[in-house]
Image (cartoon, rainbow, N blue to C red):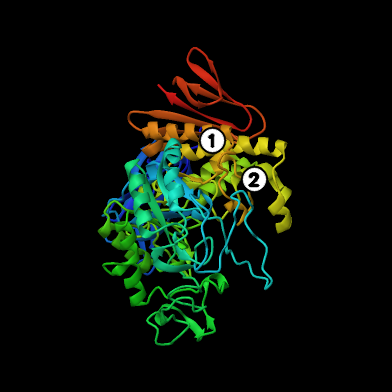
Amino acid sequence: MHYRPTYDSRDLRYKSPYGAVASGTPVAFTLRPGRAEGFSHASVTARFESRMNEIVVAKMPWQGHDLGQDIFFVELDTAGYVGLIWYSFRLEKLDGRTQDLGPYQLTVYDGEEEVPSWFGEGVTYQIFPDRFCRSRVPDPEGLVGGRTIHERWEEPPEFRPDQYGEIRNRDFFGGDFQGIIDKLDYLKSLGVETIYLNPIFEAAENHRYGTADYGRVDPMLGTNEDFSRLCGEAHRRGMRVMLDGVFNHTGYVSRYFNGDGFYPDTGAKQSQDSPYRPWFNFTQWPQKYESWWGIYSLPAVNENDPSYQDFIFNGPNSVVRQWLRAGADGWRLDVADELPDSFVSGIHRAAREEKPDSVVIGEVWEDGSTKVAYGVRRKHILGGHCDGLMNYPLRCAILSYFQGGKAEAFVEGMETIRENYPAFAFYSAMNSLDTHDTPRFLTLMGAGGESRDQSKEWRAKFRLSPRQRFRGHQLLKTAALLLYCFPGSPTVYYGDEAGLEGFEDPFNRQTYPWGREDQELLAWYQALGRLRRRHPALRRGAIRYVCGKGPLLAFLRETEEERLLCVFNAGGEEQRLAVEEDQPHPLLGQAGLLHREDSCEITLPPRSGAVFELE
């Protein structure tokens, strides 16, 4: 006998509409207990978290029965509310016995504003500017930070502490804007539509996350005019540019804090009368101050200070506005969950006013709908804050799946995200296998557990053996195909497509291997780019899972005009999937097809994936 649940929040027969809803949308709940269970009454209890945890209890009248199930129904009003609703059900029998279901999450967002769709549809390419491409060997003389330059592009980055035990990050390779401009046609060949740049503003460290001057690009990259030229050249090729907004902290070496006195400005550390003094939280001026994660070189700012807000987003020539005017098309907010919601909202408002089709993407490592930071439930994706988030939950699910986890867990985790996120946020997610903050996927997959408990010296020298690289190669290609088939923007961390290896920072930030690329991987990523660009179902189609069992994962991406079947085998043995009625036509991948009279069978080799168009 087929089991029918009493309630399933992901089934429109039980809850409509699906998933998160715009404020003011009535939500219909239906319970369907078996008639034999003898329930006579039902009710729903809803806790409106953002309305001082107000509790609403509503009876669910009996509506009749259907196929051996009683039907209890009610509509919940969400008018005037934005936030999470936690709801649960109670079923009662005539003898007083009860059954409780829940709690379940309902995300209610502000749906008044239309979110631009361009970011989530196309491929994004993440560039760590110092390490992508240089047009010349720069001269560090007179630049902030006491920098050194690697003469040879192929040298490894420095990772050892200096004589004072401090990792300074002052070794530069000299990647620049002209180098990126020279490679725009290469990025175009990968199908790239958005270039995401890690920080570009003047800073003492090679990662540039300790901003020294928000009004000036780092001279090693070029000039402000060179940045605008880069944006113009990208736009001419149909690409957009997204900047990294680091607004939670500045650099110790900066115009604003001026810890070492490099700048002529009177910084917060020089004088209590400095205009920048209110930007920083000193516990004992000038020696003790709050900093990001206790790192002294990154003094934390007071985002609630009005003058700082004017500087970043409120003023007519604010940082957010200035660089959108200069040619940028959006902002990725560093440590978005460490910025107050009102601050993120201010950035979003300024960005939209300045450039109506600009987007704001937040760095959040968890489920962004339930994220709590500093004891506060965040409003990241409730509308008017972030248009999308970095999809680290997807990365975690992919890693687990390809490291021997079950496809069932992948489906459950990703369906939870789809259910919890407003559609605009789900489809505008920044999806990546790795970033500047994580080890390279190729290295993780190839090395397996070999790196566990190893020293930094060991990890610096580590290179995959031919056997390890073959395995990592297979899994990277399959995982990249999954990434390109999934809703949201597939984001390539520079060099992944060329076979770059590396564990954590700075080994994941080696220079791009121009002239030494892995040609097989490169051809694969170019094919992925073409696939994504040519098929609307991958850019904006709905997702529906067909199979999630052990190492085998399959889902459909669908629009009214097109249906694509995406299948993956994360395991070490061949897998088969039966497809009935539809005729699959191969688009990409190495799967075998065995046609029968009214069905066909797809055969997937170990650690592989394939995409088919269905008639």
User: Under tag 2, what secondary structure?
Assistant: helix
The reply to whether the C-beta atoms of the residues labelled 1 and 2 are less than 8 Å apart is no
Closer to us: 124 or 52? 124
> What's the residue at 57%, 53% (across, down)?
509
Q: Which residue is mark 1?
A: 522
User: Under tag 1, what secondary structure?
Assistant: helix
> What's the distance in space between the residues labelled 1 and 2, CA to CA?
17 Å
Q: Which residue is mark 2?
A: 443
Q: Position of residue 548 (x, y in %)?
A: 55, 36
Asked whether, in this view, residue 108 is left or right of residue 35, the answer is left
Image vertical order of residue 291 relative to residue 34, above or below: below
Q: Amino acid at mark 2?
A: Thr
Q: Does residue 55 appear in this view? A: yes
Asked whether, in this view, residue 21 is left or right of residue 180, the answer is left
* Image disc number at residue 412: none
State the count of labels.
Answer: 2
Closer to us: 143 or 506? 143
Q: Position of residue 82 (x, y in %)?
A: 33, 60
Closer to us: 5 or 15? 15
For the C terminus, the quadrant is: top left
Q: Crowding near pointer 1: few (<14 within 10 Å), some, many (20+)? A: some
Image vertical order of residue 287 relative to residue 26, above or below: below
Image vertical order of residue 284 relative to residue 600, above or below: below
Q: Amino acid at mark 1?
A: Leu
Q: Nearer the viewer, mark 1 or mark 2?
A: 1
Q: Position of residue 565 (x, y in %)?
A: 46, 29
Q: Does residue 59 appear in this view? A: no
> What's the residue at 35%, 57% (across, down)?
225
> What's the residue at 45%, 57% (across, down)?
221
Q: Crowding near pointer 2: few (<14 within 10 Å), some, many (20+)? A: many
